[in-house]
Image (cartoon, helix red, strand yellow):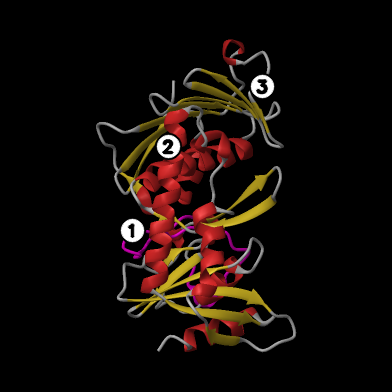
Protein backbone atom coordinates (compact mmCIF):
# COMPACT_ATOMS: atom_id res chain seq x y z
CA UNK A 1 0.00 0.00 0.00
CA UNK A 2 1.40 3.39 -1.02
CA UNK A 3 1.88 5.70 1.94
CA UNK A 4 2.90 8.83 0.08
CA UNK A 5 1.10 10.64 -2.74
CA UNK A 6 1.87 13.81 -4.68
CA UNK A 7 -0.10 15.71 -7.33
CA UNK A 8 1.09 17.92 -10.19
CA UNK A 9 -0.68 20.05 -12.79
CA UNK A 10 1.38 20.82 -15.90
CA UNK A 11 -0.80 23.36 -17.73
CA UNK A 12 -3.87 21.16 -17.43
CA UNK A 13 -2.06 17.82 -17.65
CA UNK A 14 -2.88 16.46 -14.19
CA UNK A 15 -0.73 13.74 -12.70
CA UNK A 16 -0.88 11.68 -9.51
CA UNK A 17 2.13 9.72 -8.29
CA UNK A 18 2.11 7.38 -5.30
CA UNK A 19 5.01 5.60 -3.65
CA UNK A 20 6.14 3.72 -0.58
CA UNK A 21 9.23 5.97 -0.49
CA UNK A 22 8.99 9.29 1.32
CA UNK A 23 12.44 10.17 -0.06
CA UNK A 24 11.25 9.80 -3.66
CA UNK A 25 8.17 11.95 -3.06
CA UNK A 26 10.35 14.60 -1.41
CA UNK A 27 12.75 14.66 -4.37
CA UNK A 28 9.99 14.88 -6.99
CA UNK A 29 8.34 17.62 -4.95
CA UNK A 30 11.56 19.62 -5.27
CA UNK A 31 11.99 18.74 -8.96
CA UNK A 32 8.53 20.01 -9.92
CA UNK A 33 7.80 22.51 -7.13
CA UNK A 34 6.18 25.06 -9.49
CA UNK A 35 3.62 22.48 -10.67
CA UNK A 36 2.84 20.92 -7.30
CA UNK A 37 -0.84 21.03 -6.33
CA UNK A 38 -3.16 19.99 -3.54
CA UNK A 39 -5.06 16.78 -4.06
CA UNK A 40 -7.57 16.72 -6.93
CA UNK A 41 -10.31 14.21 -7.60
CA UNK A 42 -9.24 12.92 -11.00
CA UNK A 43 -6.03 12.92 -13.00
CA UNK A 44 -5.08 11.94 -16.53
CA UNK A 45 -1.90 10.18 -15.40
CA UNK A 46 -1.58 7.77 -12.50
CA UNK A 47 1.91 6.50 -11.70
CA UNK A 48 3.21 4.25 -8.93
CA UNK A 49 6.89 4.03 -7.98
CA UNK A 50 7.97 1.30 -5.58
CA UNK A 51 11.30 1.17 -3.77
CA UNK A 52 11.36 -2.62 -3.87
CA UNK A 53 12.01 -5.52 -6.21
CA UNK A 54 9.50 -6.12 -8.97
CA UNK A 55 7.14 -9.07 -8.42
CA UNK A 56 8.15 -12.16 -10.37
CA UNK A 57 4.75 -12.11 -12.09
CA UNK A 58 5.61 -8.74 -13.65
CA UNK A 59 8.97 -9.66 -15.10
CA UNK A 60 8.84 -9.90 -18.92
CA UNK A 61 10.24 -12.77 -20.94
CA UNK A 62 10.89 -13.48 -24.57
CA UNK A 63 12.59 -11.37 -27.22
CA UNK A 64 12.94 -7.65 -26.58
CA UNK A 65 11.14 -5.46 -29.11
CA UNK A 66 13.60 -2.58 -28.60
CA UNK A 67 17.03 -2.28 -27.08
CA UNK A 68 19.17 0.68 -26.04
CA UNK A 69 22.18 1.30 -23.82
CA UNK A 70 19.83 2.02 -20.94
CA UNK A 71 17.01 -0.49 -21.29
CA UNK A 72 15.28 -3.41 -22.99
CA UNK A 73 11.65 -2.87 -24.04
CA UNK A 74 9.02 -5.60 -24.32
CA UNK A 75 5.71 -4.73 -26.00
CA UNK A 76 2.48 -6.63 -25.31
CA UNK A 77 -0.26 -4.73 -27.12
CA UNK A 78 -0.73 -1.37 -25.42
CA UNK A 79 1.49 -2.39 -22.48
CA UNK A 80 5.25 -1.89 -22.52
CA UNK A 81 7.74 -3.23 -20.02
CA UNK A 82 11.13 -1.53 -19.76
CA UNK A 83 13.93 -3.45 -18.07
CA UNK A 84 16.82 -1.17 -17.12
CA UNK A 85 19.30 -4.05 -17.11
CA UNK A 86 18.15 -5.31 -13.73
CA UNK A 87 18.28 -1.96 -11.94
CA UNK A 88 14.64 -0.98 -12.50
CA UNK A 89 11.56 -2.44 -14.14
CA UNK A 90 8.67 -0.34 -15.41
CA UNK A 91 5.25 -1.32 -16.73
CA UNK A 92 3.47 1.35 -18.78
CA UNK A 93 -0.09 1.08 -20.11
CA UNK A 94 -0.53 3.54 -22.99
CA UNK A 95 -4.30 3.03 -23.09
CA UNK A 96 -4.84 4.32 -19.56
CA UNK A 97 -1.70 6.43 -18.96
CA UNK A 98 -0.83 4.36 -15.91
CA UNK A 99 2.61 3.19 -14.87
CA UNK A 100 4.29 1.08 -12.23
CA UNK A 101 8.00 1.25 -11.49
CA UNK A 102 10.03 -1.02 -9.22
CA UNK A 103 13.62 -0.61 -8.08
CA UNK A 104 15.65 -1.13 -4.92
CA UNK A 105 17.87 1.83 -5.93
CA UNK A 106 16.43 5.23 -4.95
CA UNK A 107 18.72 7.00 -7.44
CA UNK A 108 17.47 4.95 -10.37
CA UNK A 109 13.87 5.21 -9.21
CA UNK A 110 14.17 8.99 -9.00
CA UNK A 111 15.91 9.33 -12.38
CA UNK A 112 13.39 7.23 -14.31
CA UNK A 113 10.33 8.64 -12.51
CA UNK A 114 11.44 12.17 -13.42
CA UNK A 115 11.99 11.28 -17.08
CA UNK A 116 8.75 9.30 -17.29
CA UNK A 117 6.77 12.33 -16.09
CA UNK A 118 8.49 14.70 -18.51
CA UNK A 119 8.16 12.27 -21.43
CA UNK A 120 4.41 11.66 -21.11
CA UNK A 121 3.43 15.18 -20.07
CA UNK A 122 5.79 16.64 -22.68
CA UNK A 123 4.19 14.63 -25.46
CA UNK A 124 0.69 15.75 -24.45
CA UNK A 125 1.80 19.39 -24.34
CA UNK A 126 3.48 18.98 -27.74
CA UNK A 127 0.18 17.81 -29.21
CA UNK A 128 -1.48 20.96 -27.85
CA UNK A 129 1.10 23.25 -29.49
CA UNK A 130 3.03 23.89 -26.27
CA UNK A 131 6.46 22.89 -27.52
CA UNK A 132 9.71 22.82 -25.56
CA UNK A 133 13.09 24.03 -26.75
CA UNK A 134 16.40 22.87 -25.30
CA UNK A 135 17.57 26.20 -23.92
CA UNK A 136 17.85 28.34 -20.80
CA UNK A 137 15.47 31.25 -20.37
CA UNK A 138 14.83 34.14 -17.98
CA UNK A 139 13.23 37.57 -17.87
CA UNK A 140 14.63 40.95 -16.90
CA UNK A 141 12.25 43.88 -16.79
CA UNK A 142 10.00 43.72 -19.85
CA UNK A 143 12.32 41.39 -21.80
CA UNK A 144 12.39 37.60 -22.07
CA UNK A 145 15.64 35.99 -23.18
CA UNK A 146 16.12 32.47 -24.44
CA UNK A 147 19.59 31.06 -25.02
CA UNK A 148 20.42 27.92 -26.99
CA UNK A 149 23.71 26.12 -26.40
CA UNK A 150 24.86 22.54 -26.96
CA UNK A 151 24.93 20.06 -24.08
CA UNK A 152 27.81 21.02 -21.76
CA UNK A 153 27.83 24.35 -23.56
CA UNK A 154 27.47 26.47 -20.42
CA UNK A 155 23.70 27.01 -20.00
CA UNK A 156 23.62 26.08 -16.33
CA UNK A 157 26.80 27.98 -15.50
CA UNK A 158 25.49 31.11 -17.18
CA UNK A 159 22.13 30.91 -15.41
CA UNK A 160 23.81 30.26 -12.04
CA UNK A 161 25.72 33.52 -12.41
CA UNK A 162 22.69 35.42 -13.73
CA UNK A 163 20.88 34.47 -10.51
CA UNK A 164 23.24 36.77 -8.61
CA UNK A 165 20.83 39.46 -9.80
CA UNK A 166 17.72 38.74 -7.76
CA UNK A 167 15.60 40.99 -9.99
CA UNK A 168 15.64 38.47 -12.83
CA UNK A 169 12.85 35.90 -13.10
CA UNK A 170 13.38 32.26 -14.03
CA UNK A 171 11.57 30.73 -17.00
CA UNK A 172 13.56 27.50 -17.27
CA UNK A 173 17.15 26.35 -17.04
CA UNK A 174 16.65 23.63 -19.64
CA UNK A 175 13.32 23.52 -21.49
CA UNK A 176 11.08 26.61 -21.76
CA UNK A 177 7.82 26.22 -23.67
CA UNK A 178 7.03 28.07 -26.89
CA UNK A 179 3.39 28.34 -27.92
CA UNK A 180 2.02 28.66 -31.46
CA UNK A 181 2.12 32.46 -31.17
CA UNK A 182 5.85 32.37 -30.44
CA UNK A 183 5.45 33.39 -26.79
CA UNK A 184 7.99 32.10 -24.26
CA UNK A 185 6.05 30.25 -21.54
CA UNK A 186 7.62 29.28 -18.19
CA UNK A 187 8.45 25.65 -17.53
CA UNK A 188 10.65 25.92 -14.43
CA UNK A 189 12.10 22.71 -13.04
CA UNK A 190 14.82 22.03 -10.50
CA UNK A 191 18.07 23.80 -11.34
CA UNK A 192 21.04 21.64 -12.30
CA UNK A 193 23.90 23.85 -11.13
CA UNK A 194 27.06 22.99 -9.21
CA UNK A 195 26.88 25.94 -6.86
CA UNK A 196 25.41 29.40 -6.35
CA UNK A 197 27.09 32.43 -4.84
CA UNK A 198 25.69 34.06 -1.70
CA UNK A 199 24.32 36.86 -3.90
CA UNK A 200 21.72 34.47 -5.35
CA UNK A 201 20.02 34.37 -1.94
CA UNK A 202 19.62 30.60 -1.62
CA UNK A 203 17.61 29.74 1.49
CA UNK A 204 18.06 26.64 3.64
CA UNK A 205 20.64 24.79 1.47
CA UNK A 206 20.31 21.58 3.49
CA UNK A 207 16.64 21.38 2.54
CA UNK A 208 16.72 22.75 -1.01
CA UNK A 209 19.99 21.32 -2.35
CA UNK A 210 20.16 17.64 -3.23
CA UNK A 211 22.06 15.22 -5.45
CA UNK A 212 21.10 12.66 -8.10
CA UNK A 213 23.50 9.86 -9.01
CA UNK A 214 22.87 8.92 -12.65
CA UNK A 215 24.11 5.79 -14.42
CA UNK A 216 25.33 7.33 -17.66
CA UNK A 217 25.79 11.00 -16.84
CA UNK A 218 27.27 10.90 -13.35
CA UNK A 219 26.46 13.02 -10.33
CA UNK A 220 24.10 15.95 -10.80
CA UNK A 221 23.77 18.64 -8.13
CA UNK A 222 20.24 20.02 -7.93
CA UNK A 223 18.54 23.04 -6.37
CA UNK A 224 14.81 23.36 -5.80
CA UNK A 225 13.18 26.62 -6.92
CA UNK A 226 11.55 26.76 -3.50
CA UNK A 227 14.93 27.76 -2.08
CA UNK A 228 15.37 30.81 -4.34
CA UNK A 229 13.93 34.32 -3.95
CA UNK A 230 13.54 34.75 -7.72
CA UNK A 231 10.04 34.80 -9.17
CA UNK A 232 8.94 32.76 -12.18
CA UNK A 233 8.95 34.79 -15.40
CA UNK A 234 5.78 35.53 -17.34
CA UNK A 235 5.21 36.41 -21.01
CA UNK A 236 6.95 39.70 -21.89
CA UNK A 237 6.44 42.08 -24.85
CA UNK A 238 10.09 41.95 -25.93
CA UNK A 239 11.86 38.67 -26.73
CA UNK A 240 15.53 38.02 -27.42
CA UNK A 241 16.70 34.73 -28.93
CA UNK A 242 20.42 34.03 -28.80
CA UNK A 243 22.95 31.30 -29.44
CA UNK A 244 25.74 31.04 -26.89
CA UNK A 245 29.21 30.03 -28.02
CA UNK A 246 32.26 29.49 -25.87
CA UNK A 247 35.36 31.51 -26.73
CA UNK A 248 38.16 30.77 -24.22
CA UNK A 249 40.77 33.52 -24.10
CA UNK A 250 38.47 35.97 -25.86
CA UNK A 251 36.36 38.85 -24.57
CA UNK A 252 32.58 38.55 -24.31
CA UNK A 253 30.84 39.76 -27.45
CA UNK A 254 27.16 40.38 -28.30
CA UNK A 255 26.43 40.47 -32.03
CA UNK A 256 23.10 40.95 -33.79
CA UNK A 257 22.56 38.20 -36.37
CA UNK A 258 20.01 37.41 -39.05
CA UNK A 259 16.91 35.38 -38.34
CA UNK A 260 17.99 33.02 -41.09
CA UNK A 261 21.08 32.05 -39.07
CA UNK A 262 18.81 30.87 -36.24
CA UNK A 263 16.89 28.32 -38.32
CA UNK A 264 19.39 25.50 -37.86
CA UNK A 265 19.83 25.94 -34.06
CA UNK A 266 16.03 26.04 -33.67
CA UNK A 267 15.66 22.94 -35.83
CA UNK A 268 18.13 20.99 -33.68
CA UNK A 269 17.06 22.27 -30.26
CA UNK A 270 13.31 22.49 -30.81
CA UNK A 271 12.02 20.60 -33.85
CA UNK A 272 14.32 17.60 -33.28
CA UNK A 273 14.50 18.40 -29.56
CA UNK A 274 18.05 17.17 -29.05
CA UNK A 275 18.87 17.35 -25.35
CA UNK A 276 15.30 17.72 -24.10
CA UNK A 277 14.63 15.78 -20.87
CA UNK A 278 12.59 12.88 -22.22
CA UNK A 279 13.25 9.26 -23.18
CA UNK A 280 12.12 7.27 -26.20
CA UNK A 281 10.86 4.28 -24.21
CA UNK A 282 7.96 6.42 -22.94
CA UNK A 283 7.61 9.00 -25.71
CA UNK A 284 7.71 6.67 -28.72
CA UNK A 285 4.70 4.36 -29.20
CA UNK A 286 3.98 1.73 -31.84
CA UNK A 287 1.43 1.82 -34.65
CA UNK A 288 0.07 4.16 -37.32
CA UNK A 289 -1.94 6.28 -34.89
CA UNK A 290 1.20 7.30 -33.05
CA UNK A 291 2.97 7.89 -36.36
CA UNK A 292 0.39 10.57 -37.11
CA UNK A 293 0.73 11.95 -33.58
CA UNK A 294 4.47 12.33 -34.06
CA UNK A 295 3.92 13.93 -37.48
CA UNK A 296 1.52 16.41 -35.85
CA UNK A 297 4.09 17.16 -33.15
CA UNK A 298 6.76 17.84 -35.78
CA UNK A 299 4.46 20.24 -37.64
CA UNK A 300 3.45 22.06 -34.45
CA UNK A 301 7.08 22.37 -33.36
CA UNK A 302 7.96 23.94 -36.70
CA UNK A 303 5.07 26.42 -36.40
CA UNK A 304 6.05 27.38 -32.83
CA UNK A 305 9.73 27.67 -33.79
CA UNK A 306 8.97 29.95 -36.73
CA UNK A 307 6.62 32.06 -34.62
CA UNK A 308 9.36 32.45 -32.00
CA UNK A 309 11.85 33.41 -34.69
CA UNK A 310 9.55 36.04 -36.20
CA UNK A 311 8.75 37.52 -32.80
CA UNK A 312 12.32 37.68 -31.44
CA UNK A 313 15.43 39.78 -31.87
CA UNK A 314 18.34 37.47 -32.71
CA UNK A 315 21.90 37.58 -31.36
CA UNK A 316 25.06 35.54 -31.00
CA UNK A 317 26.66 35.62 -27.55
CA UNK A 318 30.38 34.89 -27.56
CA UNK A 319 31.22 33.85 -24.00
CA UNK A 320 34.63 34.29 -22.41
CA UNK A 321 36.08 31.88 -19.86
CA UNK A 322 34.96 34.17 -17.00
CA UNK A 323 31.40 33.09 -16.07
CA UNK A 324 30.57 35.97 -13.72
CA UNK A 325 31.67 38.53 -16.29
CA UNK A 326 29.62 36.77 -18.98
CA UNK A 327 26.48 37.14 -16.86
CA UNK A 328 27.12 40.82 -16.10
CA UNK A 329 27.90 41.49 -19.75
CA UNK A 330 24.68 39.82 -20.91
CA UNK A 331 22.55 41.77 -18.43
CA UNK A 332 24.17 45.00 -19.61
CA UNK A 333 22.86 44.31 -23.13
CA UNK A 334 19.21 44.32 -22.03
CA UNK A 335 18.26 47.94 -22.57
Mark in front: 2 vs 3? 2
Which quadrant of the view contains residue 290?
Answer: top left
- Disc on the earlier residue, 2 or 3: 3
Q: Please, is residue 31 above or below residue 56 in the view?
A: below
- Which numbered dot is residue 239? none
- Disc on the earlier residue, 1 or 2: 1
Residue that protrudes farthest toward the top in the picture:
57
Please report the residue visible at 67 percent of the width from the left and 82 percent of the height from the top.
322
Please report the residue visible at 72 percent of the width from the left and 37 percent of the height from the top.
69
- Percent across and percent down for residue 45 are 37, 33
Q: Residue 20 vs residue 325: left or right?
A: left
Q: Nearer the viewer, residue 282 or 45?
A: 282
Residue 125 shows up from this direction: yes
Please report the residue visible at 39 percent of the width from the left and 67 percent of the height from the top.
308
Marks 3/1 in contact by CB < 8 Å: the verdict is: no
Q: Quadrant of the N terminus?
A: top left
Q: Main secondary structure of the magenta part?
A: loop
Q: Which residue is mark 3?
A: 64
Which quadrant of the view contains residue 43?
Answer: top left
Crowding at dot 2, Cα within 10 Å, few <14 / some 14-19 / many 20+, comes out as: few
C-alpha separation, residue under disc 2 versus residue under disc 3: 25 Å
- Disc on the earlier residue, 3 or 1: 3
Q: Which residue is mark 1?
A: 180
Mark in front: 1 vs 2? 2
Q: Nearer the viewer, residue 211 or 56?
A: 56
Element carrying mark 3: loop
Q: Which residue is mark 2?
A: 292
Range covered by the magenta-colored residues:
175-202
Q: Residue 55 vs residue 311: left or right?
A: right
Amino acid sequence: MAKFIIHFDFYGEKLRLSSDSEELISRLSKDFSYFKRDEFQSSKYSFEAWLQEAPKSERPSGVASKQSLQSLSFDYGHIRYNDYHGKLLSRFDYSSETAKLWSTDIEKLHEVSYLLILSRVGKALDLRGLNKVHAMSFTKGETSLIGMMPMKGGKSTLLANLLNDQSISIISDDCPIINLKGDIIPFPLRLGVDELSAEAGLKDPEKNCYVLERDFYGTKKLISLEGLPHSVGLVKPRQILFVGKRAPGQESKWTKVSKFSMIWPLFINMVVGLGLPMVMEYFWENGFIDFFRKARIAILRVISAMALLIKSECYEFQMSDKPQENAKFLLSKIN
